[in-house]
Image (cartoon, rainbow, N blue to C red):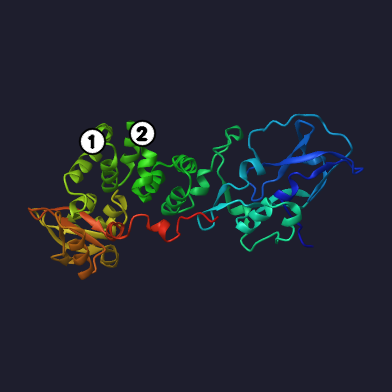
Amino acid sequence: MAIEILHVSAIVKSALVDRNGDRLGRVDDVIVRLGDTPHPPLSGLVVRIGQRALFVPIERIADIRPGRVEMVGDTVNLQRFERRPGELLLVKDLLARHLINLQGARLIRANEIEIARLDGRWEIVGVDPSPRVALRRLLPRMLARHIPTRSGTVVDWASIEPFVAHVPTARLRIPYRKLARLHPAQIADLVEAASHDEGEEIIEAVGQDRELEADVFEELDSEHQLEFIRSRSDSEAARLLATMAPDDAADLLTELDQERRLPVLQNLPPAQQRKIRALLSYNSETAGGLMSPDFLVAAESTPISEVLDAIRTSTAPPEALAVVFSCDEAGHVTGTASVVTLIRASASATLGSVVRPDPPHVHADWDIHAIVRKMSDFNLTVAPVMDEQHLMIGVITVDDVLEQLLPTGWRRDYGMAAAEE
């Protein structure tokens, strides 16, 4: 048997009638209680009788049809409506607002909300973001009936997460566990496409995981990084920068207002301070300003088994650990070995026996064009950065180069972060 889909906009302003068909009032809103179920149940209706907004529990509703909602019995409990914790109003709180579509990590606008009766219970089943259904909602009913009721873009509510910070009485927030299933770049796309308040709600949710919060901040463009970090105290900003990669933290620190840079820097842990101070001594558009100071280097005599153990325990970024560097007694780099090479080698072999000697490198004062030429010519995914004494001081990875080559705001320009209106 086919499930009958009802639209919230067709229920609101419908007549509330008793079992005899006599009009009692009209429907003002539909109440839903969010929880762990894929399709949250309706808990009641807000109805208006005279000048009073009253609550009618869903158990007192016999039938719901467009333009007509029938009650069980012929009396209404004159109980004023008061929102309870965990409840949302579909029209006031959600209709025509942005929602997160977790399937594909995009923002959509709830131009229509669909409900249906499943196994005897009224539930939210979907959201239609099509502008066409928005037009149907805005037009008078006599004209709207000529517009199709559904588009082909309806999203199952099971993939939806609403923004609810604007409803403080609901005491709800976006669950961290849902956003944690997304890649940090996808979460950053959502933040960039959202309004400031919506973005703050997303950042607050991922803030339950300091590492994820830092990863998201690293993916944000500088405009949004500054937008959110300016609202934080010096100690809060330092806490965030302390969990970011040193090169990304240094970039963000230089974007802060001049009077805040030193206080934030001084709030950082000593080890992070040293790394960031060293990076700040280079021009931000050179290899020294782009590099990460975290990499893995070992003596040529180190057994492969120990090198692999060092990779497992290293705190360097995963992309930097794709290549391990060997050095001589003076600390000069003598060769490179990819992780694949190390895995294939005998555990008892030494690092020096498997490296490629005389690795191509870049210098700290090279600009992005020279870096790209070198990495392209030698097919490098990780390039060592050398100082004037030919000592290794950092690495540049492919993603560092791509960030410099891609135009500012490229995600939005190519529709990756735009909201589906």
Check disc 1 and report its element: helix, strand or loop. helix
Graded by Cα atoms within 10 Å as few (under 14), some (14 to 19) or many (20 or more), the crowding at tag 1 reads few
Res 299 seen here: no
Q: Image quadrant of residue 266?
A: top left
> In the displayed structure, does residue 169 sit left or right of residue 18?
left
Name the disc covering residue 393, or none. Answer: none
Q: Which amino acid does label 1 sit on?
A: Pro
> In the displayed structure, does residue 308 sit left or right of residue 103?
left
Residue 290: image location, x then y, percent: 23, 52
Q: In which quarter of the image is the C terminus?
A: bottom right
Q: Residue at x 62, y 45 (%)?
A: 94
> In the displayed structure, does residue 91 sit left or right of residue 233?
right
Residue 350: image location, x then y, percent: 19, 62
> Of marks 1 and 2, which one's residue comes earlier in the chain?
2
**353 lies above or below 47:** below
Residue tagged 1: 270
Name the disc covering residue 236, or none. Answer: 2
For the residue pair 92 and 278, the one nearer the viewer reads as: 92
Residue 381: image location, x then y, percent: 26, 63
